[in-house]
Image: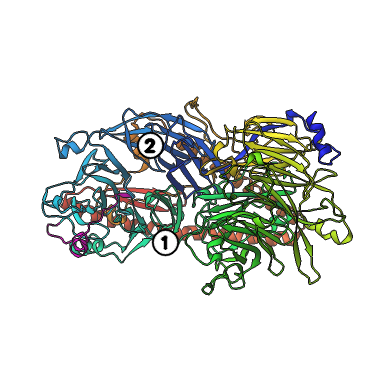
């Protein structure tokens, strides 16, 4: 009976939760955004324009593969078992993945399913694939190379032994660390062992060259310890790769040495590090020695994490991109890029010229990255070609930092590229990390008009197609604000599981608005859904307001910012991002100097309220702008009297009090006969204070304190509600505009604290309350059920890992559901609850889940009806291939129910580059991919599915062309016959005689031409015979053999073919 009395105590007559039953409250997962775990691998497909990201298996999530395309195109593949992604690559219409449990998995881009899973007989240490081959070459820890037939889904008979034992018979099992096919000759393989590199020829079926990097005593190499220089040593190899034309070979070693080889002679051209050259020669002076002589200190070098030999459109114009190898005492490591320029012609260049080419590059630069982190992996973004190891004509580099974050750099300039509208929104969660998230409701029409115009390069992701989604469910959009550690705030529509009409992102540069780029950490954000304004509060105490505007000076760098006005407002409208033409620009800044911002609220009607850690509260009228109120919480909060029995002799000073939540409303306060704009303030000591914001005769607004009550625990949410219908009584623009006409809004407050909830009429009415007996409430909000019954309820997230619903105003239990299996219970306080009952909460450090409390209780994706993905093309050529062999479906296939399409069958892969003309003239034997099928798969291997599909497609096109040609010829002949018949019927007798004479004269002329042509051909034939007889005589003298053939066409033309 208690819940029946609470409404009467609060002065509310109706039951706003009358239509809600317990069976309506159930948790369903709608979608997820972000990355579930730490990123380990990155791969890019320039043909389909897709990006794949693999993650590690950590306590936050299992290993997964995310494939991203344009806009919101996203498909997630689960790794079978609990494993991490060690190798990831696109290969034609597949994704090849090697996990930490030594399993090789293949996923189809077309069906979005796991095709097959294979466990090699030995530990896999390297994998090599090529888009023109159906095989994956696998290097093992025992030094052998085996092949897996991806088309047959079985092991191929091909196997290579441990070649390094031929170089060093005493060598133990040397693991293979890298494999790479020749960029122009697919019949040549570069095998990198830990002790050296081997060049293997498929056509000769043997190892042709051995590349062993050996340092004699006195040679410094890349080692930092001078005591090691006196020893004869061979630094272990970490990576081996080809020059883009295959002219040279580069090996990287664990001592940070970069060794360039001539593969034809197995000779070192140049050995160097990032700083020093000729390090393989005894007595070479290095920069380490110079540093020791000058400062007496010795730095430590990073290992070489990854090397890529890049090429321009011309493969002879090259450069080398290196991650790692820099001294650890450098504050910014970055990526090192050697711009080599055009490669000297090997056949005509001297040895010194070739050596100087690698010793003195045209330019050496460092692509900067954030300080105190290293680049541990990177992925180049080629413009179009997947060949040349994915390093031809790259436009950008996507780098993975040691912190787990991503950074995108333009190539080769190294300028940072913002991921906004360039990468999928999920990748922005680690580009860089997100430290604050907020959710606001924005009117649909306003959000559709908020599309920023920003200068950027060519799009990185343009592949895939979004699947069908239900039409929009609400007229308001849920817009997420994510604040990143670099001071960037991004805004985007998370949707309601429906169609997202405006999928673009907005970006606000807080660092530029503040006027500095260090110590920028956004603590609070607030977005006004009616006006589209954004407010950001920093831990350093500044509050910045952004407005939608146009940049008249786009492309021009703004002047240096002036110092901010302390304890006042500063005009920052001139601190615009030069790359932004239309978007969110800084408007004004409040520098309070009273600790970090603890609460922030921006209303739809032009008022801003901000609370600070020091206890101050500031209210700004943005019409000026003007600071209309600036005081401390201690000045207006009434201290509650306590009985003597609760006092003690050692009672200390009062605890500090600051604002924890702010809310604007329009309602009639207790004792007033009019409605006004109100501000409600909740504090960490449980106080709920109310202020009136009234117009002043001077044209401005004044703030009056109305009163406060105490809830005895930190206030986490304040909901102003209409006492007539239970709807929110926020300060909407439409409501405020009717105040002049005498509008009265009977309202009440529902204030939620960690230990209790109180429903009352402000400002000082006690009302009714309920305490939470079993757990603390971390987050709460009033939501509305949009079904046929309607109704409002209070939804809270509790520390027990449950979401609970309560009626209004009775505060009785409506239902409870576990939420901890999906959301991280330790971060429920950072979750957001939307007015429509959706919950946006963290599942891990960089992943958000969007849930709804009005579901059916089916868990992930419940209530969704899968629909077939849209077709990207209506062309007859399709990548779907009828299986030649029955395909085995793995039992552990768990794929997300994404309806997006990834593969576009119209986008064909360009033919693989071949050897040059000079190499062909010199006698180089070239092996085609078809020959590789025989060499690797064996002569008994049937045609692959791709060959069958291509043959079927060619036959279909040939038949279609034949039918089209026959139909057009018959149609034209019939049309000509009909026209001729009609003309002959209409002509007279004399016209008929004239036409017959003309036809006979024309035929006689054709006959004469044919006789003349026959005479000419006969004379030419006699000359050819004479020449042949003379050549035959010469050949008999020289001892050669000559064969001749005549091909006679239908027109009596003879072609003499001579074969010697």
The picture places residue 874, in percent across and down from the top left corner, at 61, 44
Cα distance between the residues tagged 2 and 1: 36 Å
Task: Return the residue at label 2.
Answer: 135
- Left or right, 877 with respect to 618, comes to left
Write the start and end of the magenta stretch as one range.
281-305
Q: Earlier in the sequence, mark 2 or mark 1?
A: 2
Badge 1 crowding class, 10 Å Cα cut-off, few under 14, some 14 to 19, many 20 or more, is: many
* In this view, 945 is above or below 916: above
Q: Which residue is painted at 38% across and 55% down in the image?
A: 372
The picture places residue 929, in percent across and down from the top left corner, at 37, 42
Task: Return the residue at label 1.
Answer: 414
446 or 834: which is nearer to us?
Answer: 834
Say whether marks 2 and 1 touch (CB < 8 Å): no
Q: Which residue is painted at 87% across and 53% down in the image?
A: 744
The picture places residue 341, in percent across and down from the top left corner, at 32, 64
1044 or 527: which is nearer to us?
Answer: 527
Residue 1060 in view (yes/no):
no
The colour mode here is rainbow
């Amino acid at each position: 009976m208690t819940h029946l009395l609470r409404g009467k105590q609060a002065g509310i007559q109706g039951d706003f939760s009358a239509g809600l039953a317990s069976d309506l409250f159930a948790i369903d997962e709608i979608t997820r955004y972000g990355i579930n775990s730490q990123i380990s691998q990155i791969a890019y497909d320039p043909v389909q324009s897709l990006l794949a990201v693999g993650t590690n298996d950590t306590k936050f999530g299992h290993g997964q593969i995310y494939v991203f395309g344009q806009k919101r195109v996203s498909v997630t593949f689960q790794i079978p078992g609990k494993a991490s992604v060690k190798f990831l690559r696109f290969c034609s219409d597949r994704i090849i993945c090697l996990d930490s449990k030594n399993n090789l998995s293949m996923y189809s881009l077309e069906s979005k399913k796991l095709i097959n899973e294979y466990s090699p007989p030995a530990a896999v240490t390297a994998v090599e694939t090529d888009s023109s081959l159906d095989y994956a070459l696998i290097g093992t820890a025992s030094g052998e190379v085996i092949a897996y037939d991806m088309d047959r889904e079985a092991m191929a008979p091909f196997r290579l032994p441990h070649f390094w034992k031929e170089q060093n018979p005493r060598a133990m099992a040397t693991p293979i660390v890298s494999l790479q096919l020749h960029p122009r000759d697919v019949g040549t393989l570069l095998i990198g062992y830990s002790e050296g590199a081997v060049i293997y020829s498929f056509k000769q079926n043997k190892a042709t060259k051995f590349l062993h990097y050996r340092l004699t005593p006195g040679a410094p190499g890349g080692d930092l310890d001078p005591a090691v220089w006196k020893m004869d040593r061979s630094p272990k190899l970490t990576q081996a790769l080809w020059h883009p034309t295959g002219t040279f070979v580069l090996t990287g070693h664990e001592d940070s040495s970069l060794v360039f080889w001539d593969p034809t002679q197995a000779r070192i051209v140049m050995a160097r590090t990032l700083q020093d050259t000729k390090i393989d020669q005894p007595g070479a002076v290095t920069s380490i020695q110079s540093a020791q002589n000058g400062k007496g200190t010795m730095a430590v070098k990073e290992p070489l994490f990854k090397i890529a030999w890049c090429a321009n459109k011309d493969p002879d114009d090259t450069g080398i991109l290196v991650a790692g190898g820099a001294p650890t005492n450098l504050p910014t490591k970055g990526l090192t890029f050697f711009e080599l320029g055009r490669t000297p012609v090997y056949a005509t260049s001297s040895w010194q010229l070739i050596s100087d080419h690698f010793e003195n590059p045209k330019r050496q630069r460092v692509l900067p990255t954030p300080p105190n982190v290293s680049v541990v992996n990177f992925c180049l973004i080629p413009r179009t070609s997947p060949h040349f190891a994915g390093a031809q004509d790259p436009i950008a580099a996507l780098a993975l930092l040691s912190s787990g974050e991503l950074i995108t750099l333009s190539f080769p300039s190294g300028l940072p590229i913002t991921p906004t509208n360039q990468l999928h929104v999920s990748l922005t969660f680690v580009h860089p990390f997100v430290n604050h998230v907020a959710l606001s409701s924005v009117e649909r029409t306003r959000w559709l008009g908020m599309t920023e115009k920003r200068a950027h390069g060519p799009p990185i992701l343009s592949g895939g197609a979004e699947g069908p989604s239900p039409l929009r469910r609400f007229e308001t959009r849920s817009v997420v604000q994510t604040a990143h550690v670099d001071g960037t705030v991004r805004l985007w529509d998370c949707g309601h599981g429906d169609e997202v009409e405006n999928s673009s992102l907005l970006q606000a540069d807080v660092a530029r608005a503040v006027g500095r780029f260090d110590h920028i950490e956004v603590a609070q954000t607030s977005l006004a859904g009616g006006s589209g304004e954004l407010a950001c509060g920093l831990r350093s105490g500044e509050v910045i307001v952004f407005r939608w505007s146009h940049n008249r000076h786009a492309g021009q760098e703004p002047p240096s910012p002036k110092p901010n006005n302390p304890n006042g407002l500063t005009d920052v409208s001139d601190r615009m991002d030069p790359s932004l033409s239309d978007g969110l620009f800084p408007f004004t800044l409040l520098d309070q100097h009273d600790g970090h911002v603890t609460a922030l609220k921006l209303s739809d009607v032009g008022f801003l309220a901000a609370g600070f850690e020091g206890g101050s509260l500031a209210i700004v009228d943005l019409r000026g702008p003007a600071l209309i109120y600036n005081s401390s919480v201690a000045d207006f909060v009434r201290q509650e009297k306590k009985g003597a029995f609760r006092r003690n002799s050692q009672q200390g000073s009062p605890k500090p009090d600051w604002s924890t939540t702010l809310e604007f409303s329009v309602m009639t306060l207790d004792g007033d006969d009019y409605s006004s704009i109100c501000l409600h303030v909740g504090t960490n000591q449980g106080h709920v204070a109310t202020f009136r914001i009234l117009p002043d005769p001077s044209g401005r607004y004044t703030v009056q304190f109305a009163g406060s009550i105490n809830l005895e625990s930190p206030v986490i949410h304040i909901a102003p509600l209409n006492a007539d219908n239970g709807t929110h009584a926020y300060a909407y623009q439409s409501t405020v505009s009717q105040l002049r006409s005498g509008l009265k809004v009977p309202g009440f407050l529902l204030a939620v604290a960690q230990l209790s909830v109180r429903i009352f009429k402000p400002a000082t009415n006690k009302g009714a309350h309920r305490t939470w007996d079993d757990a603390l409430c971390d987050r709460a909000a009033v939501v509305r059920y949009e079904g046929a019954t309607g109704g409002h309820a209070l939804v809270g997230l509790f520390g027990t890992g449950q979401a609970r619903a309560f009626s209004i105003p009775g505060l009785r239990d409506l239902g409870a559901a576990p939420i901890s299996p999906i959301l991280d219970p330790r971060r429920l306080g950072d979750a957001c609850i939307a007015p429509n009952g959706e919950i946006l909460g963290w599942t891990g450090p960089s992943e958000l889940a969007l849930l709804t409390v009005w579901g059916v209780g089916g868990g992930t994706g419940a209530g969704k009806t899968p629909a077939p993905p849209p077709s990207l093309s209506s062309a007859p050529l399709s990548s779907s291939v009828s299986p030649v062999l029955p395909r085995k479906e793995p039992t552990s296939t768990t794929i997300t129910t994404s309806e997006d399409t990834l593969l576009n069958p119209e986008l064909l892969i360009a033919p693989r580059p071949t050897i040059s003309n000079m190499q062909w003239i010199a006698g180089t034997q070239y092996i085609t991919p078809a020959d590789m099928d025989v060499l690797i798969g064996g002569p008994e291997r049937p045609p692959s599915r791709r060959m069958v599909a291509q043959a079927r497609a060619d036959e279909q096109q040939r038949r279609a062309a034949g039918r089209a040609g026959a139909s057009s010829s018959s149609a034209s002949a019939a049309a000509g016959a009909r026209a001729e018949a009609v003309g002959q019927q209409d002509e007279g007798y004399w016209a008929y005689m004239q036409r017959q004479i003309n036809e006979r004269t024309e035929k006689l002329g054709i006959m004469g031409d044919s006789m003349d042509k026959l005479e000419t051909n006969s004379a030419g034939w006699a000359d050819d015979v004479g020449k042949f007889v003379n050549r035959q005589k010469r050949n008999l003298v020289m001892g050669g053999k000559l064969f001749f053939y005549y091909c006679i066409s239908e027109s009596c033309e003879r072609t003499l073919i001579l074969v010697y």
